[in-house]
């Protein structure tokens, strides 16, 4: 069995010699992310004269203590940056050298100013609607994202084909080796968009391509909604020439398992749980690949019968955690379409995410290879 370091080094070597990645089409959301830290205490009134609330449980305790009373929690804006699962996935892919076409809520008639640096990375960007907004509360052990989704609900199949005729859309998809459709939980139009692609675009295409789907946190969605979405993904995976990868974090995977009434995950480590969930969900949903990525690493199961876990380079002090999962997805999908084996796809996903949270920026291909060649040991969770 190969060691963690062996897998990472092999992935780095493969990325340096594999054929370039083909074009990708990604959609369809768009958010402006306000990245904030919350103040626990102040030593002065200057911009940095504070100690932040470091953990989600500490924040929860502050909120719980205010029940029946009131409290004031100060937020400090670190920055506003482009966001949304789609732009972050697309931006991660583009930084790695993938020619990306992005379609989504990044402006109404024209691309909004905050998305212009992202647009500069992409080969083509097609705005469908104004962006929505997310307040991203950053903690050392995770994040809480508070969304306003009104604008992204304008993104529908009908809206898409009113701007891009079906024949033109089919021409774009024909050239792509990777499709990315994300944020099902917040964008009500995603099922219609997927069904439109399945019915009106995919049947006329030749060749093979991969569809990467990330549903985002489905906590607010009903079991019936989730079951319907999984049925649609199964139908898409049955489409000629299309292989579907479903990316999930651990809590999302656990929710899907309950919806499908799958056996409870046996007791064990996080790695054991993620590996079990990836395997049973892939089989139950009849998909090509399911990947489950908790903070500690990632597991994946594929239709070829392979299943692997990879210990990620977890850091106790991320510079930025909002977008970490999207960058894992970018790295994993990037490695998949370049033909790397499953364990190396996991290594690449973890490396892209690991570099991103340390640098607060999407890594390019050179940074990715260097990170894999010098993969940090994981740190215990905070």
Image (cartoon, rainbow, N blue to C red):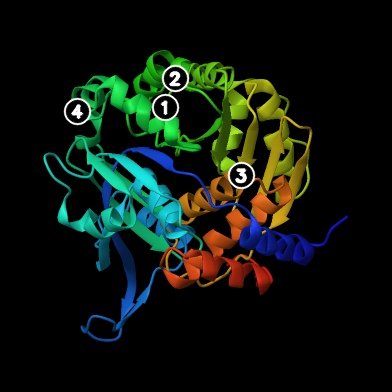
Q: CA distance from mark 2 to mark 3?
A: 28 Å
**Vertically, is 320 above or below 224?**
below
Q: Which residue is tagged 4? A: 163
Q: Which residue is tagged 2? A: 225
Q: At numbered mark 4, what does the secondary structure look like: helix, strand or loop?
A: helix
Contact? badges 3 and 1 (CB < 8 Å)? no
Instruction: Determine crowd level at label 4: few under 14, some 14-19, many 20+ residues with C-alpha closer than 10 A.
Output: few
Residue 296 visible in the shown view = no
Instruction: Determine crowd level at label 2: few under 14, some 14-19, many 20+ residues with C-alpha closer than 10 A.
Output: some
4 vs 1, front mark: 4
Q: Quadrant of the N terminus?
A: bottom right
Which of 228/200 is in front? 200
Q: CA distance from mark 4 to mark 1?
A: 29 Å
- Occupied quadrant, residue 121: bottom left
Where is residue 366 drawn, in percent x and y?
Answer: 53, 69
Residue name at image x 23 percent, y 54 percent: 115
Where is residue 144 drawn, in percent x and y?
Answer: 39, 52
Left-right relation of 379 to 68: right
Which of 226/95 is in front? 95
- Occupied quadrant, residue 267: top right
Earlier residue among tags 3 and 4: 4
């Amino acid at each position: 069995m190969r060691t963690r370091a062996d897998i990472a080094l092999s992935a780095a070597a493969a990325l340096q010699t594999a054929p370039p990645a083909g074009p990708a089409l990604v959609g369809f959301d768009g958010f402006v992310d306000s990245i904030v830290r919350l103040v626990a205490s102040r030593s002065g009134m200057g911009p940095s004269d504070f100690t932040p609330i470091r953990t989600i449980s500490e924040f929860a305790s502050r909120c719980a203590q205010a029940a029946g009373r009131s409290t004031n929690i100060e937020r400090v804006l670190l920055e506003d940056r482009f966001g949304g699962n789609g732009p972050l996935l697309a931006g991660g892919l583009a930084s790695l050298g993938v020619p990306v076409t992005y379609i989504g809520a990044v402006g109404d008639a024209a691309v909004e100013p905050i998305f212009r640096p992202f647009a500069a990375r992409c080969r083509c960007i097609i705005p469908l609607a104004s962006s929505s907004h997310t307040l991203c509360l950053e903690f050392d052990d995770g994040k809480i994202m508070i969304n306003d989704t009104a604008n992204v609900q304008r993104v529908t199949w009908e809206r898409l084909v009113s701007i891009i005729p079906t024949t033109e859309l089919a021409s774009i998809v024909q050239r792509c080796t990777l499709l990315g459709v994300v944020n099902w939980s917040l964008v009500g139009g995603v099922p219609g968009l997927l069904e439109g692609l399945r019915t009106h675009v995919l049947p006329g295409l030749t060749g093979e391509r991969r569809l990467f789907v990330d549903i985002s946190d489905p906590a607010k969605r009903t079991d019936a909604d989730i079951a319907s979405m999984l049925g649609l993904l199964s139908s898409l995976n049955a489409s000629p020439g299309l292989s579907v990868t479903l990316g999930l974090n651990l809590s999302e995977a656990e929710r899907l398992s309950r919806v499908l009434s799958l056996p409870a995950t046996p007791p064990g480590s996080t790695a054991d749980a993620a590996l079990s969930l990836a395997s049973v969900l892939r089989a139950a949903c009849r998909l090509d690949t399911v990947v489950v990525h908790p903070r500690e690493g990632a597991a994946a199961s594929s239709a070829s019968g392979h299943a692997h876990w990879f210990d990620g380079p977890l850091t106790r002090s991320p510079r930025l955690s909002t977008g970490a999962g999207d960058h894992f997805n970018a790295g994993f999908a990037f490695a998949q379409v370049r033909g790397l084996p499953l364990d190396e796809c996991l290594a690449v996903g973890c490396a892209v995410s690991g570099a991103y949270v340390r640098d607060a920026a999407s890594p390019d291909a050179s940074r990715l290879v260097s990170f894999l060649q010098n993969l940090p040991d994981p740190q215990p969770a905070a």
